[in-house]
Amino acid sequence: MSDSLVIIPTYNEKENIEKIIRKVFSLTQPFHVLIIDDGSPDGTADIVKSLQAEYSGHLFIEERAGKQGLGTAYIYGFNWAKAREYQYIFEMDADFSHNPDDLSRLREACVNGADLAIGSRYVKGVNVVNWPMGRVLMSYFASMYVRLITRINIQDATAGFKCYRRIVLQTIPLDKIKFVGYAFQIEMKFTAIKFGFNVVEVPIIFTDRTEGTSKMSTRIFREAFLGVIQMKVSSWFRNYKRTV
C-alpha cells in the first residue's frame, strides 16, 4: 500500500495519459494515481480503464459528466483521498509540464516539515521551458500581483504542482473554496497560509506540453485577476482557527 496519492484531472489527454501513468508507477517511491476525467470525448477515460488491470489497486478513475473546472476536480479528488488513508496528496497535470520525478522531492519536503510543498517555477529565477515570452511574463507578474494584494510570500502563487499533508485538507473547509480555474490554486495556498500551515516552495523546471492542447483561456485569467481582490476582502470576515 502507498500513503501517497497523485490526483490528475483530465480532459482530452489521450496523447499523454498512458505515458504519465506509466512514468509515475516507474518511480522508486510508491504512489497511487487517481484520474478525474471530465467526460473527455477523445477516449482518455477508456485508456485509463484499459490500464487498471495492470495496475490493480493502484490506479483509480472517477468520471464526471462534462467540463466542471479544475478546482472542482481537485476538490472531488481531495474528498476521495480523505475518505481513505492517504497521508500525502498531490496535484499534478497530465501533460508532463510537471516532471513526475519531482513527486518524491515534494513528498520529502512534507516528510521533513512542510504542510504544503509547492513545485515552484520562480523560487530560483525563472525555470520555464518552451513557453512564449508573453506567457512567461503573464505568469510571473501574476504571482507578483498576488503577493501585492494578499501579502503572502509565495513566489509561484499560481503553481499547480503540489503536495499536501492530509491535515491541511482536513482543516480547510473545501466546500468554501469558491474558484474553479487557476484562481483555485491561489485560493488554496492563501487559505493554507491563513490557517497557519507551513508552506514551502521546492524549485522545479516547468516544461510546456508538447502534445495535447492547453486549457488556459482569458476567462480563466480574468477569474484569477478579479478573484484575488475578492478573496482578500472576504478573508477579513472569516475565522481561520483550526478545529482539527
Image (cartoon, rainbow, N blue to C red):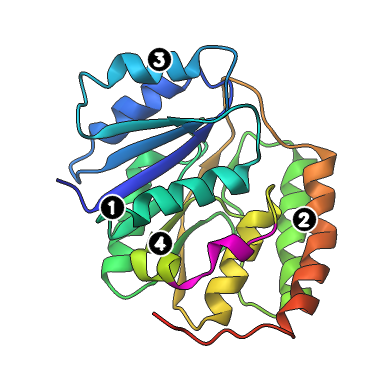
Give the residue type at disc 3. Ile
Circle number at residue 233: none
Determine the secondary structure under disc 2.
helix
Residue at image mark 4: 164
**Numbered label attached to residue 84:** 1
Q: Earlier in the sequence, mark 1 or mark 2?
A: 1
Amino acid on which disc 4 is placed:
Tyr
* Mark 3 neighbour class, 10 Å CA radius: few under 14, some 14 to 19, many 20 or more: some
Question: Mark 3 and mark 2: span between their CA atoms?
Answer: 32 Å
Q: Which of marks 1 and 4 precedes in the sequence? A: 1
Task: Please state which of the two labelled residues, at mark 3 or mark 2, is closer to the viewer.
Answer: 3
Residue at the spot 79% in from the left edge and 61% down from the top edge = 227
**Where in the figure is residue 22, as x and y percent of width and height?**
30, 25
Residue bounds of the magenta highlight: 171-178
Would you place residue 63 above or below residue 110 in this image? above
**From this viewpoint, which residue is outermost toward the left?**
1
Could you tell me which quadrant the N terminus lies in? Answer: top left
